[in-house]
Image: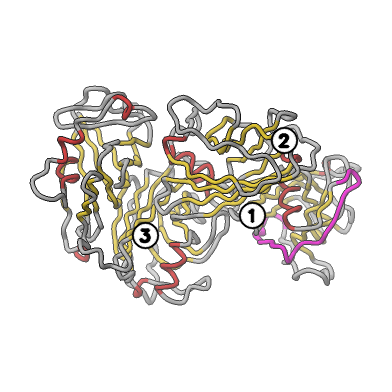
Amino acid sequence: MFQKKFFGLWLIIGLFAFLTLGCNGDKKVGDEFKDATAADLENRQFVISDGEAFDEDLENEEVILEFGTFDVAGVAPFRLTSNGQVATGVATLQSPLLLRFLHIAAGLPFRVNDEVSFEVFIDPRNRLALVNEETDQDSTSDPAGESENPPIEILATLRGSQEVPVPVVTDTNGFAALTFNEDRTEILYTLQYSAAPTDFTQAHIHVGGTGVNGPIIFFLCTNLQPPEGVPAPPACFRGDGTIQGTLTADNLIPAGGIADFAGAVQAILDGNTYVNAHTVGNPAGEIRGQLGAAVLQSVLRGSQEVDPVETEASGSATLRLNNTQTQITFTLEYADILEVTQAHIHGAPAGVNGDILLFLCTNLGNAPQGRPVPPACPQAPLNDPVENTLGFADLIPNADIENFADAVNALLSGNTYVNVHTEGNPSGEIRGQVGAAALEAVLSGNGEVPPVETSASGSTVVRISGDQSTISYRLQYTNIVDVTQAHIHAGIPGENGGIILFLCTNLEPPADVPVPPFCPDPGNALDGTLTEANLRPGESPSGVIVDTFVDAINALLSGNTYANVHTEVNPGGEIRGQIE
């Protein structure tokens, strides 16, 4: 339930009472919704009308309610009950109405013909707008249309796969919803999460882009010592829970270049903040979600194809989420490529082929039936990039990515790639992993060239940022003595290549890059961050050439780099592993 600072008021209403809120005259909105056609049920869409139940089983985490003639704006938590079963989540109040389910009890799905009670919990300061497309009348909290800053809603999907630098494997998930008031002096928030293997301890908003860790600027809840100098946050639920609150300038903890509340608001609007929920088992974060309009980049080269393609072609893609993460706007460019046939977003990590999730363009007339027709793929050289906006209706779900929230999480977790296909290379000529890809090297003496007999072992985890301008890493090793330095080198398995990035050093630091950190003691982990300033151009005998930071990103994503830990006894390297 909302606290007193929410005016002590929740309006708990049925679905159709909610959708009638703010409508003009005596028009019965529910009558419009009963006219939904069979086409509305396609692509995982469900219509609930008065006295009716679900049209098919509800077992997954996303449901679309398509009402057709009205637009609805806002976000609100909801509860759905049937036969004693309960599901909770966050509703994105727009057209179509999108329900993101936080939790449905395993083995207790909602079935066809179940009698369903649907409740939406609305704070009176949420902006709820219903637009009648026939009359173009807008009934909102600002009927005169005079507000310079209409309230804005920001959403985030929280999963362990977005944690940095090491993704967390967990069944726990969550959602966060923020609503700014009109003068941008308050943020109303709702945080929901499902039970974790260990208790939740705290949750925050941090400054940082996709794939980058940053400092806390707001507490959302805590079961630990509350922060000094700001109002005490509410307690975190230890299992399934929903937490609501309000953030103002009093709650701000200046950090990460954020000096005031206006700066925090702008960082959130720019997609440069994230929500992180911490647990006893994962004190650095169990589940994380980038807030709102995150921007993701992709560098496309033939070397990222599985198997690699030798080609002079190259390309790039930029993807931007909207504030509620229900749409993806993309820009795709390519050059020095012949006879392009189609391009897609596929679901899979680097080095693995995956199913098509979204069509970007096609010249083959092969778009899935019942989905929007993609634009044609222009031939190089391009006069203009390929541009379009994609939503839930464009998604081609599969067993791993069942709904649009899953697709957004896969994008933010670095588990998707853009692939451009040609007549000469129908499986793909150039490919680029999107955003914050996570890579790992398992380090051993057997990886050295030539092999080294040693009981030492280790690992290096690499996380590329969403805009692919930063590399976060974690280096750790054990059973090793007198470590002198560690690097990322250019090179394929079986060859020695040049150093391109320092991870740590206990020797004289290099003069041409920022001073690296000291190497950790065995058994300890070192977390670090690398940017273009840290790059040392290098190459390998097989022709892996790294002259720019873009080259370094592509080499990492192509499996053409390795991590190497050097010691006094083995100055050429004692343990090594290919980064992939």
Which residue is situated farthest in the front direction here? 383
Give percent across and percent down for residue 100: 35, 41
Marks 2 and 3 in Cβ contact (< 8 Å): no
Q: How many marks?
A: 3
Vertical arrangement, residue 476 with respect to residue 307, above or below: below
Q: CA distance from mark 2 to mark 3?
A: 51 Å
| Between discs 2 and 3, the one toward the N terminus | 3
Task: Specify start and end residues of the magenta stretch as a single range.
Answer: 522-543
Residue 173 forms part of the magenta stretch: no
SS state under label 2: loop
Q: Amino acid at mark 1?
A: Gln
Residue 4's tag is none
| Residue position marked by numbered label 3 in the rendering | 223
Q: Amino acid at mark 3?
A: Asn
Q: CA distance from mark 3 to mark 1?
A: 35 Å
Mark 3 burial class by Cα count in 10 Å: few <14, some 14-19, many 20+? some
Q: Is residue 236 visible?
A: yes
| Residue position marked by numbered label 1 in the rendering | 468
* Residue appearing at x 23%, y 61% in the figure: 125
* Residue appearing at x 62%, y 40% in the figure: 418
Give percent across and percent down for residue 544: 84, 47
